[in-house]
Every structure is written in C-alpha cells, then in structure tokens.
Image (cartoon, rainbow, N blue to C red):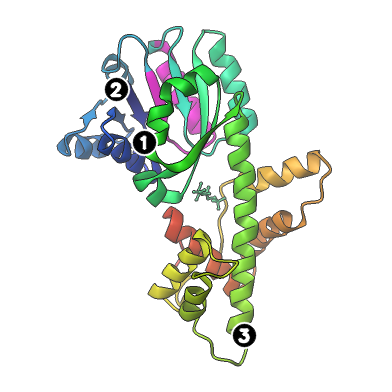
Amino acid sequence: MKIGLVGLGKMGRNLALNMHDNKFDVVVYNRNSEKTKEFIEKGIEGAFTYKELIDKLDDKRKIVWIMVPSGHAVDTVISQIKPFLRKGDLVIDGGNSKYTDTIKRGKMLKTDGIHYMDVGTSGGTNGARNGACMMIGGEKSDYEELKTMFEAVCVTDGQMYLGKNGSGHFVKMIHNGVEYGMMQAIAEGFEILEASDFELDNYDVSKVWSNGSIIESYLMSTANKAFSKNKKLEGIVDEIDSSGEGLWTVEEALKLKLPSYVITASLMKRFESKQNERFSNKVVAALRNEFGGHKIYKK
Ligand SMILES: O=C(O)[C@H](O)[C@@H](O)[C@H](O)[C@H](O)COP(=O)(O)O
C-alpha cells in the first residue's frame, strides 16, 4: 500500500513522518515545493505536481490522503487531483472538515466511482507524529483495507470506524465542542486561583492535578507544560482564535434544539476574547499553542 499525502503543514508533515517510520510507503506533495524537497532529503519520496504524485502511487489503486485546512483548500485539492483518478481509487480527508461538506464531497466523487473517506484526527501535532487518534467514516471495506495503517499511526485503540461518509468528521466536530468546554473549565479554574490571595503557583497546581486527580487529563498535562514555560503566561495576548468546529457543534445543537450550555458558552468566550482582557483567555490560547502549534499573539 502506498499513500500519496497532500499537505505538509504541521499535521500533514508529522503524519507523513509517522507513516514512514511505520514502514508505510508515502509520497508527499506540498503546494510550496521547499517542504517537499526537505522530505526528499530525509529519504521520503516526493512529487512536485499532482500528476507526478498520482503516477508514483500503486497502479492497482491510487490512495490520496489530504491534510490541508478545512473549507476551500479541500475542494481545490480534490478538483486538481480528480482528473488523474480512476474508478475505485480512494481519497481521504484527514483534516477538520465540516461533516456536511464531507457528505457532499463523498457524493460528488461517487458519481465517478471514486471512494471517499473522512478521518477526523486528534492528538495535536504530537499525536500526528507519535500516535494519533482517528475517527473514521466511509466505506467499511476501505477501512478494512487500511486498518493496519490506521493501527500503526494511532495509539492503541485510538482509531475507530464509525460508519458512513461524514461520521468521522461529525464525531471529530463534537469532540472539538467538548474540547472547547473542557479547556474553558480548566481556564476558569486557573483564573479563580490566580485571583485568590493564596499566591498559588499555576505550575504546581497543574502538576498535582495531573497526578491521580479526577481532572487529570491530556489537557491538564498540557496546561502544566504551558505553565512550566511561563507561570503567569506573561506576554500572551488574551485572544483565542477558533477554526470552526466549536461553531459547527453549536449550530448542530441549535438545529437539534438541544441545550448545550457549556460548549455554547465556551464558543462565546472565544468571540468575547477578541474584545476583553481575561487571564482565562491566555490559558486557552497557551493550551492550543502547546498541543496544536496554533498561533499565539504576543505583546
Ligand atoms: O483534537 C485535536 O487535536 C485538536 O482539536 C485539533 O484538531 C486542533 O487543535 C483544533 O481543531 C483547534 O480547534 P480550534 O481552532 O477551533 O480551537
């Protein structure tokens, strides 16, 4: 099995290295050819055009894994690779696409007999490199064909076939809604600690909470990592970006008329962060930077 990986951003590059370490043949393509050259220097096969990429894949079945930002970029890649694909080939979207877009793309590709698979990928940049969590939607037979690869690049039990096209991205979207709420709760806790007169050390508190407590978690360890570098998060501007998944989760809750207070409030906090100065906003911004390499604004 040979995978053509499109997009050598922070997630794509780590996933390509992870596949390569696990002895899966991977051919990489990136819009900016400098990154492709870096990979070729590391001994990984690269391509500089989509035609070259697809020519280098197995004749029996071309498998192209897209790791580009959600939205327009995914449609652009699909439209550019499609002329080189044939009936039975497989396109995988490993980004954070909106599940409704995934369903539309799957249907559109199906008219030419091209298979589509959605792989919601979690675990941040470190996960992509050393063992990710993947939420997978598409045809079961495609999943079965790729199962050994999913098992190799994910942590144990960290990959799951969830059902038809869209289900992988749907589950990842809700995952991110939960992520918003959990991060916000952690951030508010630290804001209250910070305002108390106990003169608490954020690093110490996040450390003890990371060892045996009920709220011990990947996110708490991430907070501990951020505070180990900067106990008071000095210099971090308290603005939090969002790439869409929280908003889509809230839209879904509204559509289903389900009261989802925490996730909705967490999303509102992000919007509010663009207007007010709050320590809790710095905490969420620092956590996103730690686990996902997302930009933080510095004073
Ligand atoms: O599970 C993960 O590894 C993260 O969720 C990852 O996918 C990314 O860091 C978020 O998409 C950021 O989302 P926001 O930009 O909306 O905070």
Q: Nearer the viewer, mark 3 or mark 2?
A: 3
Residue at image location 58% in from the left, 92% down from the top: 198
Camera-nearest residue between 276 and 226? 226
Task: Kindly state the secondary structure of the residue where label 3 is placed.
Answer: helix
Instruction: Indicate the position of residue 234 as horizontal and vertical percent values.
Output: 45, 77
Judge the density around disc 3: few (<14), some (14-19), many (≥20) Cα neighbours within 10 Å.
few
Residue at position x 60%, y 82% in the image: 193
**Magenta-highlighted residues:** 63-83
Residue 143 in the magenta stretch? The answer is no
Residue 70 magenta: yes
Please state which of the two labelled residues, at mark 1 or mark 3, is closer to the viewer: 1
Under mark 3, the amino acid is: Ala
User: Residue at left 44%, top 18%?
Assistant: 90
For badge 2, the amino acid type reads Thr
Image mark for residue 195: 3
Choose between 287 and 81: the one closer to the eye: 287
Q: Quadrant of the N terminus?
A: top left
Residue denoted by label 2: 49
Amino acid carrying label 1: it is Ala
